[in-house]
Amino acid sequence: MQILGIARSETNFTTPMDAIEAFAAIACAFLSIPPKHLQGAFIEAFKHVHTEMPD
């Protein structure tokens, strides 16, 4: 939910399935390999993404 809060901050998910479907698209985007000319930009952007580990 932390990732969805960042990537889809304007969206309110009414069911767990809605959140799972939204997260799947985000996860695929994170796992895709960007073209060579964008790799540096992606590396820099992901350096600023922080998540907290649950206790």
Image (cartoon, rainbow, N blue to C red):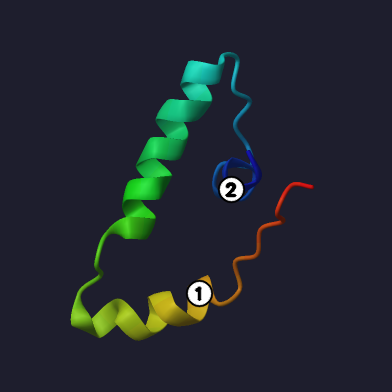
Tell me which amino acid carries mark 1.
Ala
Give me the disc on residue 45: 1
On the image, the x and y values in percent for residue 9 come to 63, 42
Give the foreground label among 1 and 2: 2
Give the class, few, some or many, for how many residues have Cα within 10 Å of label 1's Cα (few <14, many ≥20).
few
Tell me which amino acid carries mark 2.
Ile
Cα separation between marks 1 and 2:
14 Å
Give me the disc on residue 31: none
- SS state under label 1: helix
Give me the disc on residue 3: 2
Please identify the residue farthest to the right as the structure is shown: 55
Please identify the residue farthest to the left as the structure is shown: 35
Quick check: 41 above or below 53? below
Give the class, few, some or many, for how many residues have Cα within 10 Å of label 2's Cα (few <14, many ≥20).
some
Quick check: 4 above or below 12? below
- Residue 38 occupies which quadrant of the picture? bottom left
On the image, the x and y values in percent for residue 2 come to 65, 45
